[in-house]
């Protein structure tokens, strides 16, 4: 569903999709008795004698099936990876914010001096450079923040188009608990898109909702939330796949983007939204969020295969939780870490000063 949103300025947004892969050989429901590597075989009886091929999705490589007793063991490493990565993301964001503020304070007088000297320096030539700088300065802080994310997604999309990279991309940039590599794809798959329309839709949504979300949290906290949401939504998808026995690989930034959408809708529930192609129909952000959660819940329970509904639902619930409780519980309690980092930096600066004076 595509939305448009107004809040002191018009925002437009949409709902991307982190796809499952119904296009290829589907593992049987449930778990098999002995864990072993298997090659893609003929699909279940209800799917016909040949696997359905679709150019929108990459091929599936070396899936592994597991017994029901291995269900908790298979999720142990992804669980600790999710918890550890989330902690590192927020810790790094807190240190990043500290360093950024410190740099701004130290460079304040230097910038004043530079502005004074610029009056006597010849102006740099280059119309293209001036246009790029003008465009960059016209962007909001949120749009400048997500530019790097969009560039990374485009780069990964280009890697998918290199035939020699297909095997590596399928292993590391699609997420499924039945793959040989299970931790790295939790993060890498959230930067991965195999089809152009999937990439364009997700990046459009991220771009249009970036200003509101970054205004809530700031650049550093936004990056921590976004990256953590991508890993968390992938882990929720892992749990769903292990429970249902459907190990179709998933990819896409939809889980992380659903966190951004859910957070904005939670913070601004009365904002009027509209479908992009049907602007005459409007509804509140709160009602839109409820509808999205209800649809993904129904899709998860009924076994719909159009989207990775578990990842969507995990991302949406993560966004609601963080907007309601997470900011207070996590970000507001970063002071001990920042103090510890400040002491480390002070000691390091003191040692350098002492060595320089000798």
Image: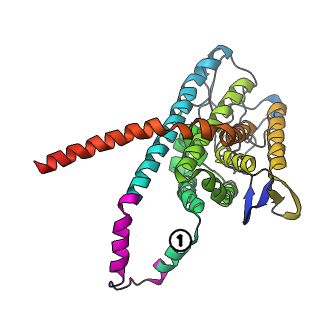
Q: Is residue 108 magenta?
A: yes
Answer whether residue 209 is magenta in the image: no
- Where residue 191 appears, as percent x and y from the top left, is 58, 48
Which residue is outermost to the left? 358
Around disc 1, counting alpha carbons within 10 Å, would you say few (fewer than 14), some (14 to 19), or many (20 or more)?
few
| Point 47% across, 83% down: residue | 127
Total numbered labels: 1
Report the front residue among 64 and 121. 121
Could you say which quadrant of the image residue 277 lies in? bottom right
- 184 or 2: nearer the eye? 2
Which residues fall within the magenta stretch? 105-129
Residue in view at x 17 percent, y 45 percent: 354
Residue 300, compared with residue 100, is above or below; it is: above
Q: Pinpoint residue 313: horizontal percent, then vertical percent.
A: 74, 38
- Left or right: where 357 falls relative to 259: left
- Residue 128, position in %: x, y? 48, 80
* Residue 173: image location, x then y, percent: 57, 43
Q: Find the residue positioned furthest to the right.
A: 281
Residue 54 visible in the snapshot? no
Main SS class of the magenta portion in the image: helix
Q: Is residue 56 visible?
A: yes
Q: According to the image, what is the colour scheme of the structure?
A: rainbow
Answer with left or right where residue 58 lies relative to residue 90: right
Q: Secondary structure at mark 1?
A: helix
Residue 37 lies in quadrant: top right
Name the residue carrying label 1.
137
Q: From the viewer's side, name the closer residue of 198 and 7.
A: 7
Residue 322 vs 14, above or below: the answer is: above
């Amino acid at each position: 569903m595509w939305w448009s949103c107004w809040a002191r300025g018009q925002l437009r947004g949409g709902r991307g999709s982190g796809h499952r892969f119904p296009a290829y050989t589907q593992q049987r429901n449930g778990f098999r008795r002995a864990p072993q590597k298997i090659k893609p075989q003929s699909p279940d009886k209800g799917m016909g004698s040949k696997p359905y091929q679709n150019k929108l999705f990459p091929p599936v490589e070396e899936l592994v099936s597991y017994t029901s007793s291995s269900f908790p063991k298979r999720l142990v490493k992804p669980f600790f990876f999710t918890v550890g990565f989330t902690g590192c993301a927020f810790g790094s964001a807190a240190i990043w914010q500290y360093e950024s503020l410190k740099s701004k304070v130290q460079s304040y007088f230097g910038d004043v001096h530079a502005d004074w000297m610029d009056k006597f320096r010849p102006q740099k030539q280059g119309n293209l450079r001036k246009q790029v700088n003008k465009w960059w300065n016209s962007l909001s802080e949120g749009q400048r923040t997500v530019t790097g994310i969009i560039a990374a997604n485009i780069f990964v999309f280009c890697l998918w188009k290199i035939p020699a990279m297909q095997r590596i991309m399928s292993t590391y940039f699609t997420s499924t608990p039945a793959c040989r590599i299970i931790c790295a794809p939790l993060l890498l798959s959230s930067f991965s898109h195999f089809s152009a329309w999937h990439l364009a839709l997700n990046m459009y949504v991220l771009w249009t909702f970036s200003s509101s979300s970054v205004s809530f949290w700031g650049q550093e906290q936004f990056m921590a939330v976004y990256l953590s949401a991508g890993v968390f939504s992938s882990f929720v998808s892992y749990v769903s796949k292990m429970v249902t026995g459907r190990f179709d690989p998933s990819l896409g930034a939809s889980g992380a983007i659903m966190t951004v959408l859910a957070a904005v809708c939670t913070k601004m529930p009365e904002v009027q939204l509209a479908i992009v192609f049907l602007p005459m129909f409007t509804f509140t952000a709160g009602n839109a969020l409820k509808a999205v959660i209800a649809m993904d819940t129904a899709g998860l329970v009924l076994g719909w295969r159009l989207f990775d509904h578990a990842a969507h639902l995990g991302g949406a619930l993560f966004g609601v939780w963080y907007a309601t409780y997470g900011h207070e519980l996590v970000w507001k309690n970063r002071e001990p870490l920042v103090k510890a980092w400040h002491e480390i930096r002070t000691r390091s600066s003191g040692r350098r000063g002492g060595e320089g004076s000798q």
